[in-house]
Image (spheres, rainbow, N blue to C red):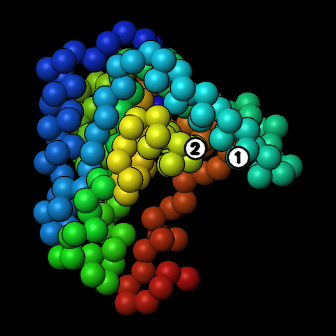
């Protein structure tokens, strides 16, 4: 979701959404998520400005699709009711259970928390968008994160006029959803 209708998210609703995120499964019960609620308007603007710089750099990397990319709305940081920065915690290296051979399971666990929040938001009629165009170290500095913490998402939450009938990037003809049968196989890699 990138198009928000302003307004607010009721504190009780926000508490339910955050509780849903916190109920997510996590490998080894490490609960590696840290969530920073951005209530300071100057910080919100700083995050927005940084994302816009990275948006320009992303467009430059797109080559011939740069102009088309710049016409897409890719974030709603200044339009949404709530901004949350979700990060991997700084103490996750101590968790070996489930991470010894796959250390990225901390990120998988954080992704489960984000997905739980997203589903709960939708059930509450609240829109949510995941902004990922940023340099983690810059966002970490902006939110005062300790060394070792790594922001992975800037989440925009809030009331919306309507939910998209299908993914916005598909509606805008940027790309299309691939059918499940292209991504699923029995016993060996999908062909």
Q: Is 103 placed above or below 20 here?
A: below
Image position, residue 29 (x, y; %): 13, 63
Which residue is depicted at the point 36% across and 25% down? 38
**Quarter of the figure with residue 145:** top left
Q: In terms of secondary structure, where does tag 2 sit?
A: loop
**Quarter of the figure with residue 35:** top left
Question: Quick check: can you spot residue 155?
Answer: no
**Quarter of the figure with residue 159:** top left
In the rendered image, the quadrant that contains the C terminus is bottom right
Residue lying furthest top in this view?
7
Q: 23 or 163, which is in the foreground?
A: 23
For the residues bearing labels 2 and 1, Cβ distance under 8 angstroms: yes
Residue 133 disc label: 2
Image position, residue 59 (x, y; %): 75, 44
Q: In terms of secondary structure, where does tag 1 sit?
A: helix
Mark count: 2
Which residue is depicted at the point 27% across and 76% down? 99
Which residue is depicted at the point 13% across and 48% down? 23
Instruction: Count residues near mark 2 (Cα–Cα under 10 Å), then give few for <14, some for 14-19, many for 20+.
Output: many
Residue lying furthest right in this view?
64
Q: Which residue is mark 1?
A: 58
Instruction: Count residues near mark 1 (Cα–Cα under 10 Å), then give few for <14, some for 14-19, many for 20+.
Output: some
Residue 124 disc label: none
Which of disc 1 and disc 2 is earlier in sequence? Answer: 1
Image position, residue 68 (x, y; %): 78, 38
Q: Is 119 placed above or below 15 here?
A: below
Which residue is depicted at the point 16% across and 28% down? 15
Per the model, the C-alpha gap separating discs 2 and 1 is 8 Å
Question: Quick check: can you spot residue 126?
Answer: yes
Q: 80 or 98, which is in the foreground?
A: 98
Image position, residue 190 (x, y; %): 50, 81
Q: 20 or 52, which is in the foreground?
A: 52
């Amino acid at each position: 979701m990138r198009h928000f209708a302003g307004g607010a998210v009721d504190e009780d609703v926000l508490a339910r959404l955050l509780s849903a995120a916190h109920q997510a499964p996590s490998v080894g019960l490490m609960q590696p998520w840290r969530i920073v609620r951005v209530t300071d308007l100057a910080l919100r603007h700083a995050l927005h400005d940084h994302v816009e710089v990275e948006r320009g750099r992303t467009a430059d990397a797109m080559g011939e699709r740069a102009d088309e990319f710049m016409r897409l709305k890719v974030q709603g940081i200044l339009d949404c009711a709530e901004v949350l920065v979700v990060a991997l915690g700084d103490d996750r290296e101590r968790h070996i259970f489930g991470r010894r051979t796959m250390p990225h399971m901390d990120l998988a666990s954080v992704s489960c928390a984000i997905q739980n929040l997203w589903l709960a938001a939708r059930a509450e009629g609240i829109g949510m968008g995941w902004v990922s165009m940023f340099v983690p170290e810059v966002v970490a500095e902006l939110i005062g994160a300790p060394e070792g913490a790594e922001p992975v998402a800037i989440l925009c939450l809030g009331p919306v006029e309507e939910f998209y009938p299908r993914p916005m990037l598909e509606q805008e003809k940027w790309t299309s959803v691939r059918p499940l049968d292209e991504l699923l196989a029995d016993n060996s890699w999908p062909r």
